[in-house]
Amino acid sequence: MRIRSCLAALSLLGGVSVATLTAPSASAAPCSDIEVVAARGTFEPGTLGFIVGDPVYSALQKKLTGKSLSSYKVNYPADLSPTSAAQGNADLVNHVNGQASACPSQRFILVGYSQGANVVDNSIGISSAGAVVGSPIVATLPASVEPKVAAVLLFGNPIRALGKSVTGVYQSRTIDFCAKGDPICESGGNDVGAHLGYSADADAAATFAAGKV
């Protein structure tokens, strides 16, 4: 019930008029120094994601002043369909592979919130199957691209409720925020509002990423 309440709250946010959102001024430069690849949460509005992607991108713009920044919003439904996260997984991997080929010097910061964290988990080889709005892995970033991923920023990550986390080669480059009581990432969590408050962690996430770039 609490999990459904969280997703329902995000659905209501999805009805917010775009005119009321403060979107980042994301550059469309094809070969920026750093590309922020953001997977939004279920029903989350915003340019890259109202709760996480947009505030994180804005914070990164302030932290990485000596580097050019661009962004990519993972193209996937971000709904409750059983294939939603898998579609995001495939799109993220396809996009990053294409960028890595077109822009050999470009590095990436991967951002995922809620279902978007499942998308990122799968893309770096950590299955979200069995998690809330998760899916089996359908694609992973190849070993040739792995060194280009500077940081992985995760928020309200559903695999945490299964006792899982990012391990392996990406572990030291990953920061994974789970607010106390968040029922999406904390088993037994009962604070629906906690899942909607990750904008407060944008600066900490950007600071972490800046230390990895």
Image: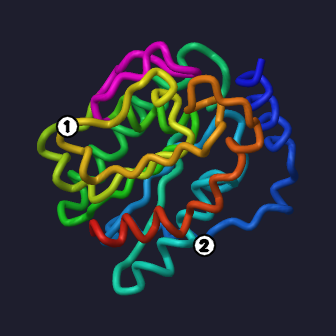
Q: Earlier in the sequence, mark 2 or mark 1?
A: 2
Q: Is residue 127 left or right of residue 148?
A: right
Foreground residue, 134 or 108? 134
Q: Is residue 23 above or below residue 131?
A: below
Q: Which residue: 64% across, 62% down?
A: 200
Real-space CA distance between mark 2 and mark 1, rounded to the nearest whole angstrom: 34 Å
Quarter location, residue 168: top left
The quarter in which the N terminus is drawn is top right
Tell me the number on the disc at residue 150: none
Q: Locate residue 71, reporting x and y percent.
A: 47, 60
Which corner quadrant of the image does residue 91 belong to? top left
Dot 2: element: loop
Which segment is the magenta one? 124-139
**Rendered position, 145 above or below 123:** below
Q: Mark 1 belongs to which amino acid?
A: Gly
Would you name the residue on which mark 1 appears? Answer: 168
| Residue at x 51%, y 21% (from the top left corner) | 134
Residue at image mark 2: 25
The kind of secondary structure element at disc 1 is helix
Please provide percent x and percent y for residue 103. Answer: 24, 61
At horizontal 69% and vertical 52% (from top left) the residue drawn is 197
- Majority secondary structure of magenta residues: loop
Residue at 62% in and 39% down = 41
